[in-house]
Image (spheres, rainbow, N blue to C red):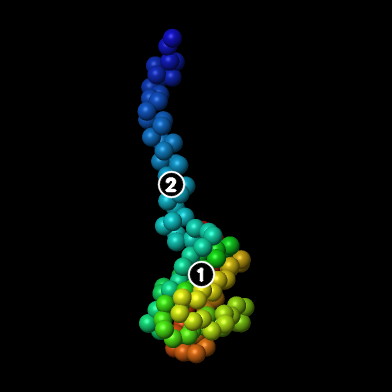
Amino acid sequence: MTYAFARKGFHPLRACTGLLLVFCASFVTPAICAAAPPATAVDIKKFAFGPNEITVAPGTKIIWTNHDETPHTVTSTDKSFASKGLDTDDKFEHTFASEGDFSYTCTLHPYMTGIVHVRKH
Ligand SMILES: [Cu+2]
């Protein structure tokens, strides 16, 4: 039995490596964009949102968690989303369906600000 492709310079091992690269890239690319649906975390800590600026793909759910001993809220400037007062370890989540820039604050501490950029890649 002979392998016709071997004589044409087609190396099976090289083909496998190529496939592996494509396979890896399909997973790595969304991770680099920090936009892999379904969920991305934002921490509320020391009276700040972290990260306070984030870019995600449409359809991404963001989950905010309050790590402070003080209550905070996540309230969008355009009122498209608003949490209740979050106690320690409480979470609030919102899924960003469409593209845009969504700024938000904590209504209890208006100097706490954040923004979510929703962009297709
Ligand atoms: Cu606050």
Q: Considering only vertical position in the picture, is 58 above or below 116?
A: above
Of residues 112 and 18, the one nearer the viewer is 112
Query: In the image, what residue occupies the spot 54% across and 60% down?
Result: 38
Residue 5, quarter of the rendered image: top left
Residue that label 2 marks: 25
Pointer 1 local density, CA inside 10 Å: few below 14, some 14–19, many at least 20: some
Whether residue 50 can be seen here? yes
Q: Which element carries disc 1, helix, strand or loop? A: strand
Of residues 10 and 91, the one nearer the viewer is 91
Mark 2 vs mark 1, foreground winner is: 1
> Which mark is first along the chain, 1 or 2?
2
Amino acid carrying label 1: it is Ile
Counting labels gives 2
User: In the drawing, does residue 109 fall left or right of residue 59?
Assistant: left
Asked if the residue at label 1 sits under 8 Å from ligand 1, the reply is: no
Query: Where residue 40 is drawn, which disc sits there?
Result: none
Instruction: Work out which residue is located at the far top of the displayed protein and give it.
Output: 1
Residue 23, percent from left and from top: 45, 42
Residue that label 1 marks: 63
Whether residue 105 can be seen here? no
User: In the drawing, does residue 96 fall left or right of residue 29?
Assistant: right
Q: Which element carries disc 2, helix, strand or loop? A: helix
Alpha carbons under labels 2 and 1: distance apart: 26 Å
